[in-house]
Image (cartoon, grey):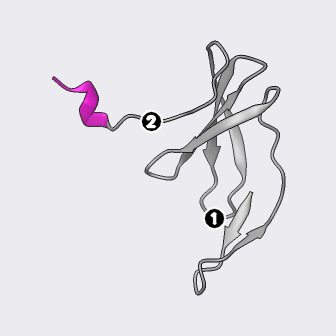
Amino acid sequence: IYAIDQGTGLLSFVAHAPTGGANPRGFCIHEAGRFVLVGNQDTGTIVTFAVDEAIGELTPTGSVAEVSMPVCIRVAPAEWGRG
């Protein structure tokens, strides 16, 4: 977890967060910034975390998707599901 200096844009380390699996390989911050999805390659899971916008803390939501060796995570825009 990193903090962003609003004046310079520089990052500073805050803490490590467990990913709920083995060998986290990729992650995606949802466009609204409220969720982070982490792909754990060796566990075969994508775990969703809620982001506390005030302090940046990540909390597991309980949503875990089982997939084969996730290595790249991307959230499709909502309009992709319309049609």
Residue 5 position within the rendered picture, expressed as x and y whole percent measured from the top left: 65, 79
| Dot 1 alpha-carbon crowd within 10 angstroms: few under 14, some 14 to 19, many 20 or more | few
The kind of residue on which mark 2 rests is Val
Residue 46 position within the rendered picture, expressed as x and y whole percent measured from the top left: 64, 25
At 15% from the left edge and 23% from the top edge, which residue is drawn? 83
Label 1: element kind: loop
Q: Earlier in the sequence, mark 1 or mark 2?
A: 1
Query: In the rendered image, which quarter is residue 8 located in?
Result: bottom right
Query: In the rendered image, which quarter is residue 63 located in?
Result: top right
Residue 31 position within the rendered picture, expressed as x and y whole percent measured from the top left: 44, 49
Q: How far apart are the two marked residues, 1 and 2, measured between alpha carbons?
A: 23 Å
Segment colored magenta: 78-83
In front of the other: 19 or 70: 70
Please identify the quadrant where the N terminus is shown. bottom right
Q: Please determine whether, in this image, residue 4 is positioned above or below residue 18.
A: below
| Dot 2 alpha-carbon crowd within 10 angstroms: few under 14, some 14 to 19, many 20 or more | few
Q: Please determine whether, in this image, residue 66 is positioned above or below residue 24.
A: above
Residue located beneath label 2 in the image? 75
Residue located beneath label 1 in the image? 54
